[in-house]
Amino acid sequence: MAMACSTERRRLTYSSTTATAATTKWTDEVPPELLGLIVKKLASNVVDIIRFEAVCSSWNRAARLYTSAPYYTQLPQYPWLMLLILPIPIPDKWSWCPKPPRIDHESRCFFSLAENKVYKMDWKASQDFHGYGECLGSSHGWVAIREFKTMILSQEIVHLFNPISRQRLTLPLRPGKASTAKFVLSSNPSCNNNFVVVVIYDISLGPPGIAFYQHGRGGGNAAAWTDLEGSLDHYSDIVFHNNGQLFALSTNHSIQVWDFRNTYNNYPTKIMDFQPSMNRNVLDGPMTHHKKWLVESMGEILFVERQWLWLGSDTKGAADFYVCKLNIAAKTWEKVQCLRGCALFLVRNQSAMSLSTRELPKLEENSIYYAETYQEGDLNKRKLHGGWSEIRVGGVYKFNLETKVAKPYYITREHVDTSYSKPIWIVPSP
C-alpha cells in the first residue's frame, strides 16, 4: 500500500479499490457527531486519520474540524524516517526489511517504526517549491526545506512544510548571511501562530552565529531575522527548553542560554553562559570524528556525542555513543548510564529527539535509534536528472546504551539519494 498526498490536501489512495457512488452516499449520511467520535478514537495514529480523511469530503471535513479545534491536543506519535529512495536494488541480505514503493524526485519515502512499513508521499517539488529542496531537519512535525535562488549560496530560501497537512510557510530572506545548518521551532505552527524560528549558520560559508525570526509578533523587526547577541561561537546544536529557553551547545561543550519567553516587542535575554566541566575519560576511544547533539529529555538537558569507530574500510553502523546530563547548579556534565523510560532519535544533520517508551511502548528504552547512510561497494555516484547524484544505502540502527551494541533495525532495500534530501526523523503532526 502506498500513501500519496495531493498538493491540495493530504489524501490516501488505494490502487486496488475505487469508492462507488453507493459507498459515497452512505458515508455522507453519517452524523457529524458520530464522525467526531470516530476521529477521536483514531487520534493515536496519524496514518489512521489520513485514511479516514480519504473516504469522502464529509469525513475529510470532520477530521480537519477535529484537528484544528482549540481543545485538540495531539497524542504521542511514533516517529517516521524520511528518505529519498531510488529504484536501484541492493543485495538480498536486507530482504527482511520492508521494500519501499517506486519513487522519484517528486516523492519521499517514510519508514514507520510502529508499523514497520514504508509509505510513499508525493512531494510535488515542481508545484510546491521552486526546485529540488534540501531538507534541513524537522521540528514539531514541520520540515525545513532550503532552496537557492541563485548560485550564491548565501541567498537561500527556507520553507517550513508540514508533509501531513500540506501547509507551507516561506520564511523571510536573510540577505548577506551564511546558509542555514540547523533549525528549531519554539512551538508547532499548526497550533500557535506566534512561534519562533532559530537557526545556526553554516560556518563553512560565513561567520558563525545564531539568528532568529519571530512569526506573528509585533514590533519593528517582526518580519526580519535578528542575530542573537553574543552568539559568536561555533555551535553544534540548539534546543528549546522550559517553554521558551533556548540552549545552545558550542563545539567546546560550553552552554549559552537565551530566554525567549515574553519577548513580544522585546529582545530575548541571554541568561547563562558557562562551560560545564567534563571528565574527558568519558570520551576516550578510537574514532574517526565526533558528532554532538543537545536534546531535551524527561525535563533534563542531555548532551550526546557519537564517535565513529575506525574499522578500516567498513564503518557501517560502527559507532559508540556517550550521554551526559547537564547539572546547571554544579556546572558539570554528568555521565548518564541509562536512558530510563525514553529512547533517543538521532541523525547527523538534525537536532535530536527524545520520546517516552511508556507512551510509545513499541520503542525500546535505553536505546538510541540513529539513521545512517553509507556507501555500498563502488556504487556511490550516478548520473540522474541531468546531473550527478550521491547514491548511498540508508537505514536505522538501534544502539543499546548499556551493552554498547548497535544492531540494524531497518535497512533500505534500494539506494538513497542524499544529494537533495538527507535522512531526517519526523514526528507526524496533522
Image (cartoon, rainbow, N blue to C red):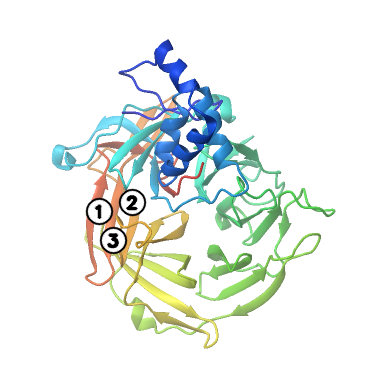
Split into 4 quadrants, where in the image is the N terminus?
Answer: top left
Of pointers 1 and 2, the one earlier in the residue sequence: 1
Q: Nearer the viewer, residue 151 or 90?
A: 90
| Label 3: element kind | loop
Q: Is residue 124 visible in this depiction of the protein?
A: no
Q: Name the residue tied to disc 3.
A: 364
Q: Residue at x 50, y 21 (%)?
A: 28
Figure check: 305 above or below 181: below
Q: Which residue is drawn at 48% across and 26% down?
A: 30
Q: Name the residue tied to disc 2.
A: 372
Task: Inspect the image, locate mark 3, and give the three-letter code of the amino acid beneath it.
Answer: Glu
Of pointers 2 and 3, the one earlier in the residue sequence: 3
Q: Residues within 10 Å of mark 3 (few under 14, many from 20)?
A: some
Left or right of 30: which side holds 376? left
Query: Are the two marked residues, 1 and 2, in contact with CB atoms closer than 8 angstroms?
Result: yes
Of pointers 1 and 3, the one earlier in the residue sequence: 1
Q: Nearer the viewer, residue 369 or 377?
A: 369
Task: Inspect the image, locate mark 1, and give the three-letter code of the amino acid beneath it.
Answer: Lys
| Label 2: element kind | strand
